[in-house]
Image (cartoon, grey):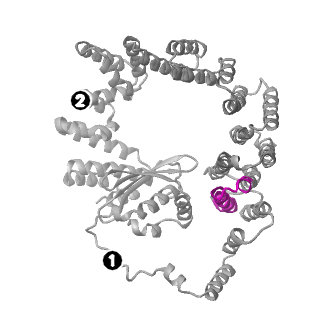
């Protein structure tokens, strides 16, 4: 399939979702790793990486996505990536390739429409809306005057949701379409933010939240799309308030605060701490008004008192609420008051970290080390926190210029499989001592029951390819990663390990998806060792697995 006509090969539903992802700016970044080899970052319920290989003629020769979708050959993230790449295809497809059509022959819809009369345009719109009900609804929503846009938005959101409900439930593959009304409302809210209509933007997003949060109870959100609509609503509310609060008088601020806090305290957010916290955090920006500050602080203290010690996430919820109280102080009080508040809660890791960061800024590195040592003892059973305090301690030793302490900590980090500290450790070690230190490091790793990636990175860094080859012999799947470093000195050995690896994964493959993975490895092998050897393996596998027609079919597709 070519980049210019990929739409012909992808399911319409996936294509529509990918187009929406592209249109709404979910394609975050495009990186050209090598010529015609692209990594595209696409944001959704999480950030996913789409990999695309394109040849000089614009043919998509290989593509993959690290999302969990496996219902079809292509996912919505790949579709969005193709749209993004297609937009810049002049850069991707080599200029020597001639286009089959010229600008002269291309029909320009904009030019045609601009030459039509007003009556002709009206008739076209009427014809389209009479045929497509959703387009009529969207035009009315966007352009018809409405005395209460919040009510009309809620009505629209519910209409779409009810349309895709079946026996009170929305299946995962209908969720996207069911939330079309919510997306249209958010689109209008974004425009309101651009026009500095803060109240309207906030109330439209609250309308979305009031319905969509509850929709989680009767829909399958395995795609994460409901969650992303909620997150976007919260983001727009925060942006609108942060950028527009100075334009609002006190009376308007109080009304808007009441609306947001009312939504935050609704029972629909029970169990959804992060979303409730996000709304309450937006409320902190209104605390320049004394009445509002008193109300919010009282509410937060009340919520703190209501947390049961028996709750599994009691500590987590207390931390969240205390951070909101701290934010109010940081926004509207002197620094000393914030420091006092933090020190009163220093036993909690979140506040210990805040204290450490403030001390680092002030240059009180010995106090930083003291807090880190206390933290290591206090959180001895929490592996992650112990290493966090060690890293802050390392920063303090760096600022103090204590080389010996730095080396000792960096060695700990390296043995903890953090290779990033290797170069600095080497730099801080006397060159005459380094050979002995390096041997001690390698011996330490080699004694471990499992080889860590930091050990392999050291071998690459120090060009110890003999040791790397021995590792690949014991772990044949690793040859796909490390073959390029071994070819010059160990060509025949690498060839043998590669063949052994292909035989192994071919034997384990049991469905078309796995057969394709085997073929992908064979393609790499062919590039490295040539067509003759590659074809020999293909022929051997075709004969060996002739009773697996799907495998033979995939092998036959290798060019």
Q: Quadrant of residue 477?
A: top left
Which residue lies under the disc numbered 1? 100
From the viewer's perspective, is residue 286 above or below residue 178?
Answer: above
Q: Quadrant of the C terminus?
A: bottom left
Tell me the CA gap for discs 2 and 1: 50 Å
* N-terminal-most mark, 2 or 1: 1
* 257 or 382, nearer to the observer: 257
**Residue 454 sits in which quadrant?**
top left
- Residue 341: horizontal and vertical position, in percent? 69, 22
> Where 111 falls versus 177 (above or below)?
below
The verdict on residue 184 being magenta is yes
- Compared with 19, 531 (above or below) is above
Q: Position of residue 452 (x, y in %)?
A: 39, 26
The quarter of the picture where the N terminus appears is bottom left
Left or right for 329, reference 51 = right
Residue 73 shows in the view: no
- Give the percent coordinates (x, y) of residue 121: 61, 84
Name the residue located 37 percent from the left edge and 13 percent from the top edge. Answer: 403
Residue 421 magenta-highlighted: no
Taken as a whole, is the magenta stretch helix, strand or loop?
Answer: helix
In the picture, the disc for residue 157 is: none
Does residue 418 appear left or right of residue 132 in this picture?
left
- Disc 2 marks which residue? 463
Q: Secondary structure at mark 1?
A: loop
Q: State the extent of the magenta-drawn residues as a range.
A: 174-202
């Amino acid at each position: 399939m070519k980049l210019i006509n990929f739409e012909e090969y992808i399911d319409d539903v996936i294509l529509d979702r990918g187009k929406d992802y592209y249109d709404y700016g979910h394609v975050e970044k495009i990186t050209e790793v090598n010529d015609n080899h692209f990594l595209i970052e696409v944001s959704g319920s999480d950030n996913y990486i789409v990999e695309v290989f394109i040849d000089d003629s614009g043919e998509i020769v290989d593509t993959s996505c690290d999302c969990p979708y496996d219902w079809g050959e292509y996912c919505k993230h790949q579709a969005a990536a193709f749209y993004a790449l297609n937009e810049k295809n002049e850069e991707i497809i080599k200029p020597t390739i001639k286009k089959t059509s010229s600008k002269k022959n291309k029909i320009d819809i904009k030019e045609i429409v601009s030459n039509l009369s007003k009556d002709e345009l009206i008739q076209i719109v009427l014809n389209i809306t009479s045929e497509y009900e959703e387009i009529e609804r969207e035009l009315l929503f966007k352009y018809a005057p409405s005395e209460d846009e919040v009510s009309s938005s809620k009505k629209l959101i519910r209409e779409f949701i009810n349309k895709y409900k079946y026996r009170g439930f929305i299946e995962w593959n209908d969720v996207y379409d069911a939330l079309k009304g919510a997306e249209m409302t958010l689109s209008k809210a974004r425009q309101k933010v651009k026009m500095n209509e803060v109240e309207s933007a906030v109330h439209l997003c609250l309308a979305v939240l009031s319905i969509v949060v509850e929709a989680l109870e009767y829909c399958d959100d395995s795609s994460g799309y409901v969650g992303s609509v909620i997150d976007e609503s919260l983001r727009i509310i925060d942006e609108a308030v942060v950028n527009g609060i100075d334009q609002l008088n006190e009376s308007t601020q109080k009304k808007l605060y009441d609306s947001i806090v009312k939504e935050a305290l609704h029972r629909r957010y029970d169990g959804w701490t992060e979303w409730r916290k996000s709304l309450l955090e937006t409320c902190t920006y209104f605390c320049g008004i004394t009445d509002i500050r008193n109300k919010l602080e009282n509410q937060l203290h009340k919520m703190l008192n209501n947390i049961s010690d028996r709750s599994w996430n009691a500590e987590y919820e207390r931390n969240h609420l205390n951070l909101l109280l701290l934010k109010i102080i940081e926004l509207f009080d002197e620094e000393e008051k914030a420091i006092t508040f933090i020190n009163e809660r220093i036993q909690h890791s979140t506040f210990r970290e805040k204290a450490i960061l403030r001390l680092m800024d002030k240059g009180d590195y010995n106090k930083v080390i003291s807090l880190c040592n206390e933290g290591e003892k206090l959180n001895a059973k929490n592996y992650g926190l112990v290493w966090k305090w060690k890293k802050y301690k390392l920063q303090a030793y760096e600022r103090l210029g204590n080389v010996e302490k730095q080396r000792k900590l960096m060695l700990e980090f390296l043995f903890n499989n953090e290779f990033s500290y290797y170069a600095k450790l080497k730099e801080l070690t006397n060159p005459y001592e380094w050979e002995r230190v390096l041997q001690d490091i390698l011996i330490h790793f080699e004694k471990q029951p499992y080889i860590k990636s930091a050990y392999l990175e050291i071998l690459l860094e120090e060009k110890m390819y003999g040791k790397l080859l021995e590792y690949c012999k014991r772990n044949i799947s690793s040859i796909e990663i490390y073959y390029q470093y071994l070819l010059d000195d160990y060509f025949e050995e690498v060839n043998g390990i590669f063949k052994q690896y292909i035989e192994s994964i071919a034997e384990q493959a049991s469905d078309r998806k796995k057969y394709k993975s085997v073929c992908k490895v064979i393609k790499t092998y062919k590039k490295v060792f040539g067509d003759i050897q590659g074809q020999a393996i293909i022929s051997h596998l075709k004969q060996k697995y002739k009773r697996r027609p799907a495998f033979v079919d995939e092998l036959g597709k290798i060019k």
